Image (cartoon, helix red, strand yellow):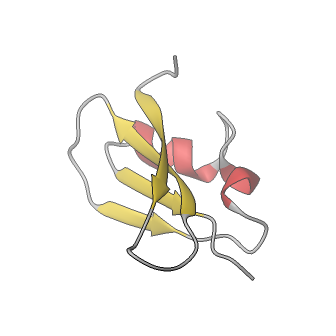
Amino acid sequence: PHAGHRIDKLLLRRDEGIPLPALLFVPHQVQGAAYLYLHGNGKQAEATEDGRMAALARQGHLVLAIDLPG
């Protein structure tokens, strides 16, 4: 459990290609914008409770963080 939000682990798939692991930060009460969060060091770089994605979720924003190949 996280204060003010939950984190869903996802695996995004297309018909062809590499599956993309992702985290979806969902605030308990959505009241803001939706963000696509990409980090050069991967989604785990800011996935901590005091990281940027959690801070955005606590403010009411949806945040989808994806690990891109390469």
Write the residue at 53% across / 79% down: 17
Write the residue at 44% across / 57% down: 64
Counting labels gives 0
Q: Measured from the top left, where is residue 67 in percent x and y?
A: 63, 65
Check the image and report above or below for 56 versus 43: above
Q: Measured from the top left, where is residue 9 in percent x and y?
A: 51, 41
Write the residue at 38% across / 42% down: 59
Check the image and report above or below for 57 versus 66: above
Check the image and report above or below for 64 versus 8: below
Q: Measured from the top left, where is residue 38 in percent x and y?
A: 59, 71
> Seen in the image, is 49 located left or right of residue 31?
right
Check the image and report above or below for 8 versus 62: above
Write the residue at 53% across / 59% down: 65
Name the foreground residue: 52 vs 45: 45
Q: Measured from the top left, where is residue 26 in percent x and y?
A: 36, 39
The answer to which quarter of the image holds residue 36 is bottom left
